[in-house]
Amino acid sequence: MAETIGNLTDKIIIFELKRYHMKEETLRKDADRQHIKECRQRLAILDMQINDLVKEMNELIKKNLAGKKLPRLYRQFKMYNDPKYKK
């Protein structure tokens, strides 16, 4: 598991937005039955994916709290706009 809590949070939010809009598609009055059916199938897949991500998040939080998996700090090294790195 190479994810961080922040990465997982970001993914969950994106999937929730997709889920929200897919749910709206299932409620359209002007869409044909096939479209509604496909959107319901996709909605079920999105639900499964969100549940997987939430489960992974919960496991990561438990490991962090237990001290079994410590978050890593990745430092940014910006080289642009720094006169030391100009050619």
Image (spheres, rainbow, N blue to C red):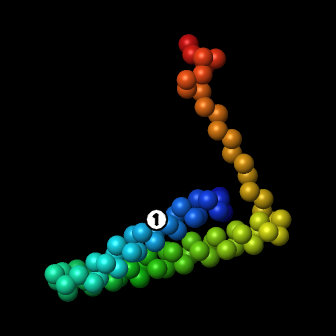
Indicate the position of residue 51 as horizontal and vertical percent values: 54, 78
Q: Which residue is mark 1?
A: 14
Q: Is residue 44 above or below residue 2?
A: below
Q: Secondary structure at mark 1?
A: helix
- Residue at horizontal 73%, vertical 52%? 72
Residue 18, percent from left and from top: 39, 70
Q: Quadrant of residue 77?
A: top right
Find residue 49 and report its horizontal and vertical position in percent.
49, 74
Residue 66 sits above or below residue 37 on the image = above
* Most distant residue in the right direction: 67
Quarter of the image for the N terminus: give it: bottom right
* Residue that appears at 23% across and 81% down: 28
Q: In the rendered view, does 61 fall on the left or right side of 27?
A: right
Q: Nearer the viewer, residue 21 or 4?
A: 21
What is the three-letter code of the residue carrying label 1? Answer: Ile
Q: Is residue 35 left or right of residue 73?
A: left
